[in-house]
Amino acid sequence: MPYALPSKQFLLLAGLLALTRFDHFAPIPDASLAVFVLGGLWVGGGFAFAALFALAFGVDVLAVGLDEARAYCMTPAYWGLLPTYGLLWLAGRHLARQANPFAWTRLLAVSTTAFSLAFVMSNLSWWLLSPRFDMPFVEFWQAVARYYPAYLGGASLWLLLATLLAQGMRARRAAAV
């Protein structure tokens, strides 16, 4: 099969991932979660998923190289992001099979469920696989639960912006016909 250039959507998502992932606590929220849902929706394919995951990993390695304090998250638990992002990608693939994937009620239900499950998966893998600390599960969960609103809010914000962009482009194409 001949090599195909990356799509505009893939390049947009890769750029958004690279620009926002570098500092998870910056004023601009990390777009990683939304990028994987949108990647499943707009791009699909295992190669695109692997490329975006490799990019996320590369950005994280670069961040650690520039600031060793960021190495805190680089433990065997990091690989829990693989199934976490895979779940988000599959949520996007599910949306892609819908007649109108950007219908607000469906998008809200699927994305909120996917982002919530991703929060549980990533934190559960951190608790199970990270050697950084040893605390009972309930205590751990109480400590990380406070991050859930920002986790859900940041991902939802990026998805909302993508939805508005997609609807604007659809309206522009319809008006041109």
Image: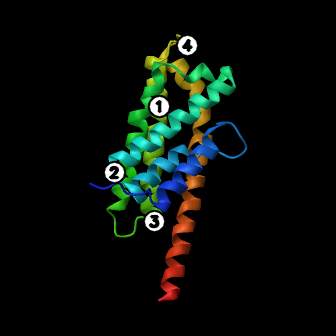
Query: Which three-letter amino acid code belongs to the residue tagged 4?
Result: Arg
Q: What's the CA distance linking mark 2 and mark 1?
A: 22 Å
Q: What's the CA distance linking mark 2 and mark 4?
A: 35 Å
**SS type, badge 1:** helix
Report the residue at 73% width, 44% height from top.
27
Q: Position of residue 94 (x, y in %)?
A: 34, 55
Q: Position of residue 1 (x, y in %)?
A: 26, 54
Q: What's the CA distance linking mark 3 and mark 2?
A: 20 Å
- Residue pointed to by mark 4: 132
Q: Is residue 23 visible?
A: yes
- Residue pointed to by mark 1: 122
The answer to whether the residues at label 4 and label 1 have Cβ atoms under 8 Å apart is no
Report the residue at 43% width, 47% height from top.
113
Q: What's the CA distance linking mark 4 and mark 3?
A: 40 Å
- Residue pointed to by mark 2: 45
Of callouts 4 and 3, the N-terminal one: 3
As drawn, 171 above or below 136: below
Report the residue at 45% width, 65% height from top.
102
Of callouts 3 and 1, the N-terminal one: 3
Of callouts 3 and 2, the N-terminal one: 2
**The quarter of the displayed image where residue 42 is located:** bottom left
Residue that protrudes farthest toward the left in the picture? 1
Query: Which three-letter amino acid code belongs to the residue tagged 1?
Result: Ser
